[in-house]
Amino acid sequence: MSEATRPPVARPGQPVQRPLSPHLQIYRPQMTSISSILTRITGNGVIVAVVLAVWWLLAAATSDAYFAVANAVVTSWFGDLVFTASLWAVWYHFCAGLRHLYFNAGHGLDVPTAEKLGWASVIGSVVLTVITILLVQ
Amino acid sequence: MRYLTARKRAEGKGAAGQATEHHWAMTMSSVGLAFLLPVWLYIFGSALGASREVVLETFARPFPAIVTALILVVGMRHFAMGATTMIEDYARGTTRKMLVIAATSLAWVIVATGLFALARIAL
């Protein structure tokens, strides 16, 4: 029996060796866990694009000179990168959110369906990103 | 005089004392955002990169202005509550409280800034 799996034995004056939960890094990546992690990252990450967008709107409301600065930033390679990445992120979060509404209604909770819905979110978000870029350019 | 006993008032509200209010608020805002987001992405995406005249003309119209105002308020409440859930998973004690305050404040600053800009453009 290895050190890690030894059952806890209480000895006076010594800390009990409690079994440790397996660390996140040793789990095999699965669609259900990855889609969940991505939902959190994308949902919180889009705040960067929101800050940039609201700053750009404030600049437009303020003056020509201020708008020129904000417009130069949002149309630069950096702005393109942030907004394109965030567009995918927000579409992914959108698809994953719809999936959660479906889960909450008590459907699709078996593993094969949950995995299919995870893939649908990933593929759907890429398709929606491409459609959006084509529509707004 | 309180007619409910202490137990009766606590029942069904869980350890945090809010029952499922947080989850229900996230559910409601997500449904709202599901309708708002596609429309707003089209409005914002079309205006992004355009000249200042076009941007001002876009957000001076009622529909784009109202959709943008709604997505700011509903979206930032959704963000603040979601970020709070994330912070509560990873931080504890004073750090947790400070991060929750920071995320909530950031969300409100964004709402206020966006609404100010919209008011200045549209009114």
Image (cartoon, grey):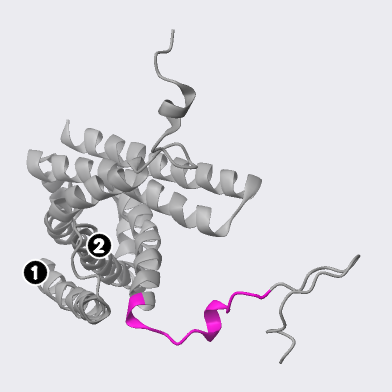
Rate crowding at label 1 as few (under 14), some (14 to 19) or many (20 or more) other CA atoms within 10 Å. few
Q: What secondary structure is found at the residue carrying circle 1?
A: helix
Q: Residue at x 45, y 36 (%)?
A: B17
Where residue B34 sits: x, y (%)?
17, 55
Q: Earlier in the sequence, mark 2 or mark 1?
A: 2
What amino acid type is highlighted by mark number 1? Leu
Q: Which residues are magenta?
A: A19-32
Q: Residue at x 15, y 51 (%)?
A: B36
User: Disc 2 designates what residue?
Assistant: A100
Where residue B122 sits: x, y (%)?
16, 35
Nearest to the eye among marks 2 and 1: give it: 2
Q: Is residue B31 magenta?
A: no
Rate crowding at label 2 as few (under 14), some (14 to 19) or many (20 or more) other CA atoms within 10 Å. some
What amino acid type is highlighted by mark number 2? His
What's the chain of the residue with tag 1?
A
Q: CA separation, marks 2 and 1? A: 27 Å
Q: Residue at x 33, y 81 (%)?
A: A31
Q: What secondary structure is found at the residue carrying circle 2?
A: helix
Q: Is residue A90 above or below residue B75?
A: below
For residue B98, say whether it is visible. Answer: yes
What's the chain of the residue with tag 2?
A
Quadrant (top left, top right, bottom left, bottom right) of the C terminus of chain A: bottom left
User: Disc 1 designates what residue?
Assistant: A135
Q: Are marks 2 and 1 on the same chain?
A: yes
When asked about the image quadrant of residue A94, the answer is: bottom left
- Residue farthest toward the top in the current orientation of the protein: B1
Where residue B93 sits: x, y (%)?
64, 47
